[in-house]
Image (cartoon, grey):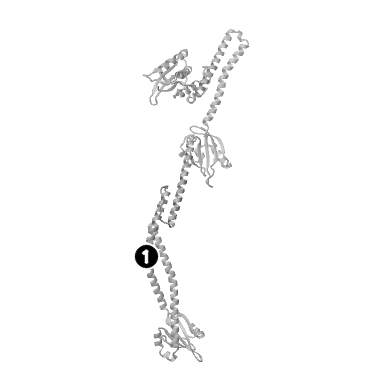
Amino acid sequence: MKKRLFIRILISYCAVILLVAAIVAVLFSRQIRLIETKQIEEGLLHTARLVSLHPFDEIRSNIRLLAQEAGARVTIIDAGGGVLADSRGDVSQMEIHLNRPEVEEARLRGSGKSVRRSSTLRDDEMYVALAVRNDKGIKGYVRMSRSLREVEDSVQRMYGFLYRTIGFALLPTLLLALVFTRKIFQPIREIRDYTQAIRRGDLSGTLLVKASDELGQLAEAINYLVEEYREKILLAHQEKGKLEAALASMVEGVVVLDSQGRIESSNRGIESILDRRSSEIHGRSILEAFMSADLQRALERFRRERKPVLEEIRLSGKQPNIVDVNISDIQGLPAGEEKTLLVFHDVTRLKKLEQMRTDFVANVTHEIRTPLTAIIGFLQTLLAGALDDRETARKFLRTIAGNAERLSRLVDDLLTLSSIELNETNLKLEPLSVDALIRTVLPMVESSAAEKKIALDTIISGAVPGILADRDRAVQVLMNVLHNAVKFTPEEGRITLSCREDGAKDWVVLEVEDTGIGIPSQDIPRLGERFYRVDKARSRELGGTGLGLSIVKHLMASHGGKMEIASILGKGTTVSLFFKRA
């Protein structure tokens, strides 16, 4: 850079010198020509006046001597224009000179001059003619001429001097350019390095230029702009950090579309909705990323109407979701940079809860209506006269009592489940022996198992540690699981109760395995929902309320444990209860 700057300054200095020299040469050459020509003209007129004082005969006889002393060509012309004598030419070969410009001017004014190329001497010459008068008028003319080559020689000498002067001036010009380059290059280099660092994103430091000229003012202006830039970047980073933090903490999914309709940015919320990374959808259109025709139609409607659009969309995928999408413009952007904001609120769980609530109301109504209908029907039959038949009346009363007990169990289970969900159940957690827990529960199901000739086996390998649980609730959990196993295991089946350790996660696992009817794989995830039954008719016939496994699931969660179910249709089911180690 320094070399280029030095060359530019040197060239500019040389150009200025050459331009000045050219102007000086033109003006001086012109002035020299005028001065030299004027001097020659005056000298020739003066000599012509001196020569005209002599008689023509004397002049003719001494013409060469006069010409030598005058340093000019002398020509004597008579009144008619004929050449009487000439110091250089042959008079006999010369034509009439009366029409020559200088002679014509001398005839009219007394003296005349002209500059022209001599046809005799083949050179540019100055001609001066002087009219010689007597009493009768013009006697003749004395003409003096001199070559103007010496004028051109003077101009050439001036050019030579000027060239030498330029040559001598180039050396100090070179030194001056070098000094000036050194003087301005250092601050320019500092400014260049500083601005290049700014381009790389390094805004540290301050530009220090020790100069009071324009470069110093430029450095101050750059420092001011950089300081302003720093403040704006800091403010932008703060605002960006706040925005990113807000977007990252949002449960809602946020997508920003550029002016071309491509996804420009998104937050983490959209990753959970789509089950894909944000980087996989950036640069794609909404249709490519979401594969939803309904969402594309909503976006097209927004583009047509340019009004915010709120619509419920069902998104397909590995886990289908239902979302409320709000489409609107981002305000305050420059013209031509329109961007669109889409906010997705996942309402899948809300929709499921609404469906579960609807199902719960329908199931409760159905579960209550069935025994109530039976009770009312048998009571009306008894009141209509069947009360007199003691055997029939006894049978009807037993049916009414069974349905009343079913209603009572249903109400008790609902109250228990509600108490657990509202955290109103106070658990008294204590170390419990698994063996003691099993000995407490088994007698409660042995009679019902014996009626169906179901074998109850207990397998406990080695010394199993105790569990941390509420005694009564642990008995209730294990009782519900065993009752379900007995109910859904055919006659002469087998139920095995075992216990093992899961050392990896510090669990003690109680497993109830039966050889019952089994559960279809698609129904297993829904086990634990209120009133959910795999075989509704069979479950009601066996006296179930449909809340047993839901109570088990919630009680295990209250203990900090969990319930897992594995089943093969037609072969049996295994329910695993995970308790914390005591």
Residue 326 location, x and y as percent?
Answer: 54, 37
Please name the residue shown 61% across and 8% down the image: 388
Location of residue 483 with respect to 54 vertically, above or below: above
Nearer to the camera, 228 or 429: 228
Q: Amino acid at mark 1?
A: Pro
Residue 435 seen in render: yes
Quadrant holding the C terminus: top left
Q: Residue at x 52, y 39 (%)?
A: 342
Outermost residue, right side: 384
Q: How many C-alpha atoms fall within 10 Å of the one at disc 1: few (<14), some, or many (≥20)?
A: few
Q: Position of residue 579 (x, y in %)?
A: 42, 22
Camera-side residue of 60 and 95: 60
Q: Nearer the viewer, residue 427 or 366?
A: 427
Viewer-side residue, 122 vs 108: 108
Residue 96 appearing in the image: no
Count of marks, rendered view: 1
x, y (%) of residue 79? 49, 89
Q: Is residue 94 above or below residue 263?
A: below
Residue at position x 56%, y 36% in the image: 311
Quarter holding the N terminus is: bottom left
> Which element is circle 1 on?
helix
Q: Is residue 348 above or below residue 3?
A: above
Q: Quadrant of residue 470?
A: top left
Above or below 333: residue 169: below
> Which residue position is annotated with label 1?
172
Q: Quadrant of residue 48?
A: bottom left
The location of residue 568, given as percent across then percent down, is 45, 23
